[in-house]
Amino acid sequence: MNYKIREENDFHYIDEGNGEILLLLHGLFGALSNWQGVIDHFSQQYRVIIPLMPIHDMPIKEAGCEGLTVFIEKFIDHVKLDKFSLIGNSLGGHVALIYTLKHPEKVQRLILTGSSGLFENSMGGSYPKRGNYEYIKERVEYTFYDPKTASKELVDEVFEITNSIPKVMRIIAIAKSAQRNNMAKDIVRIEKPTLLIWGLNDTITPPHVGHEFNSLIKGSELQFIDHCCHAPMMEQPVEFNRILDHWLGKNPV
């Protein structure tokens, strides 16, 4: 990825382009590179900001959805963001939901893709086979419609993470926090323009989860992408960007 990663205090982040702000949050096994296609497309006319969440090295007592939300609050204060559109994938969607409910004055629009918060077949809740490369490869491939999307670099990265006991402990703590933290009763209070972009073949947060979010968040719009699993912005970046671009245009701030 050809974008500069800024390092300031405890924050590592990408900040590209100018204009209206899109703040992007990655998932449990995510990285800044997950959003490459979004940065390429949207940094032409928006300011695109992506913080790296401290999933693998945050204090174990803080490892959970609330702890990550506090981190994002501190990051937003650090970068001095006033108002922005918030986009979250998987666990990042869960954090985006919590943040939106806590700070409705800052979030102009909410975009969720394969978001946790209601239900997920979690990959992180237990790790029975540390050190087994083929098992990890199979699990990473399971999150994509086309297994080839799981590049060797990505599988190697996840394998390295799962071989570190401290990192695994944090992943399990965060995954269990996400499973416990069902937001069905809370998200009915969200009144922001909301777009839901879902993979029609999502195995982690299946299509019925997208429908449930759609029924609970007033006025939300649900769009499915075929031949696509849990990370639409990586698997079908052209279609993901087209849907998002069109929706942002229909919902100006």
Image (spheres, rainbow, N blue to C red):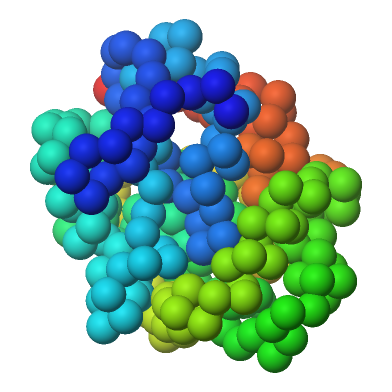
Question: Which residue occupies the foreground of this view, 86 or 31?
Answer: 31
Give above or below for 243 relative to 34. above
Find residue 141 and report its horizontal and vertical position in percent.
81, 60
Observer able to see residue 184? no
Give above or below for 101 relative to 21. below
Rendering quarter of residue 80: top left
Rendering quarter of residue 246: top right
Identify the residue at image location x=49%, y=18%: 42
Classify residue 87 as left or right of residue 115. left
Give above or below for 249 relative to 213. above
Question: Which residue occupies the foreground of this view, 15 or 10?
Answer: 10
Identify the residue at image location x=75%, y=62%: 140
Find residue 234 and report its horizontal and vertical position in percent.
68, 39
Classify residue 107 as left or right of residue 124. left
Observer able to see residue 156? yes
The C terminus is located in which quarter?
A: top left
Classify residue 207 as left or right of residue 76. right
Question: Which residue occupies the foreground of this view, 182 or 52?
Answer: 52
Identify the residue at image location x=57%, y=38%: 33
Name of the residue lying farthest toward the bottom: 128
